[in-house]
Image (cartoon, grey):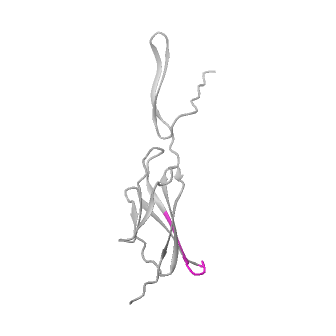
Amino acid sequence: KGTFTCPLLQPFTVYSVTISLPPSTILYTRLLRTKETVPDKPEKLWLDPSTGSLQWKALPSCKGEIIGYQLNITARRAHDGSFLEFKQVLVNQSVTQYIPSHQTPGSKYTVTVQGLTVAGAGAASLLEFQSYVSGNG
């Protein structure tokens, strides 16, 4: 008795809750914020060929305050797919690009980027690219 459920509330949203009796007696009023959830995946992830930097579009704080991004970078040999290196990088919420320290020529890279809120990591955007051996002609 006295329980009321609102099943379709949005995450990380402020709602005003008022309990009143007709005609105009307010028994309770309060502002409540729903809990944060993990963010959506970043919409765009690309490699800028002129700078060699990985770039992504910043996430909005619709489902929670974005506290950062997690990048997972895996390098494999292009000719046989054997593992070379794995690196995980955490950057703060204002960063939307990252320049990998060095790219091994002839390697295939798989990069994922996930947004982070206090609720955890969201779905990952994925990018694959290859670095080529450059010859001196």
Region of the chain picked out in magenta, as a range: 71-82
Residue drawn 60% across and 25% down? Answer: 3
137 above or below 114? Answer: below
Q: Nearer the viewer, residue 121 or 60?
A: 60
Q: How many numbered callouts?
A: 0
Counting from the top left corner in percent of width and height, residue 120 is at 53, 53
Direction front: furthest residue = 137
* In front of the other: 68 or 73: 73
Percent position (x, y) of residue 90? 46, 63
Residue closer to the observer: 50 or 13? 50
- The N terminus: image quadrant: top right
Residue 77 within the magenta-colored segment of the rendering: yes
Determine if the magenta segment contains residue 90.
Answer: no
User: Which residue corresponds to the image point at 57% horizontal and 81% vertical from the top-left?
Assistant: 79
Relative to 72, residue 135 above or below: below
Question: What residue do we see at 59% from left, 28% from top?
Answer: 5
Which residue appears farthest toward the bottom when viewing the image? Answer: 137
* Residue lying farthest to the right in this orientation: 1
> Looking at the rendering, in which quadrant would you find the C terminus?
bottom left
- Give percent across and percent down for residue 49: 39, 70
Question: Residue 56 vs residue 85: left or right?
Answer: left
